[in-house]
Image (cartoon, grey):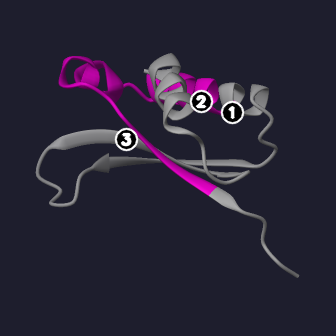
Amino acid sequence: MQICPMAYIVITFPLEVRPMMRDPQVLALLRKKARRLLRKRGYRMVFTRWHYFGEHGEKYHPHLNILCDGGWLPEEQLAELKDSIT
């Protein structure tokens, strides 16, 4: 059994909106929006996970990690997707 090609996407958010992203309801809405947009683009398997701190864990830096089937996205499509989520 082989695994199909997968895409790995990380969506970060500007400093200005991070304070309101401490609300679990806001995080849930953003995650659902990302999943819905990817499914509209034809991705069937979409796995998401929030990470709340960067590499060094010093500052609150929420970012959404997404793993989905389908492989690579052209740069323009990736930018459009990220803009529509954030």
Q: Give the range drawn in magenta.
A: 7-35
Nearer-the-camera pick, 22 or 72: 72
Residue type beneath disc 2:
Ala
SS at mark 2?
helix
SS at mark 3?
strand
According to the image, label 1 marks what residue? Answer: 38
As drawn, 21 above or below 54? above
According to the image, label 2 marks what residue? Answer: 34
Estimate the x, y position of residue 56 in percent, counting from the top left: 15, 60
Magenta stretch contains residue 64: no
Which numbered dot is residue 28?
none
Query: Where is residue 50, by image quadrant?
Result: top left
Relative placement, left or right, of 8 versus 16 is: right
User: Could you tell me which residue is drawn at 82 percent across and 78 percent down?
Assistant: 2
Q: How far apart are marks 3 and 1 (CA)?
A: 17 Å
Q: Quadrant of the C terminus?
A: top left
Alpha-carbon neighbours of circle 1 within 10 Å: few (<14), some, or many (≥20)? some
Which numbered dot is residue 63?
3
Q: How far apart are marks 1 and 2 (CA)?
A: 6 Å
Magenta stretch contains residue 12: yes
Alpha-carbon neighbours of circle 3 within 10 Å: few (<14), some, or many (≥20)? some
User: Cβ–Cβ below 8 Å for labels 1 and 2?
Assistant: yes
Estimate the x, y position of residue 73 in percent, counting from the top left: 60, 43
User: Could you tell me which residue is drawn at 23 percent across and 22 percent down?
Assistant: 19
As drawn, 19 above or below 61? above
Residue type beneath disc 1:
Leu
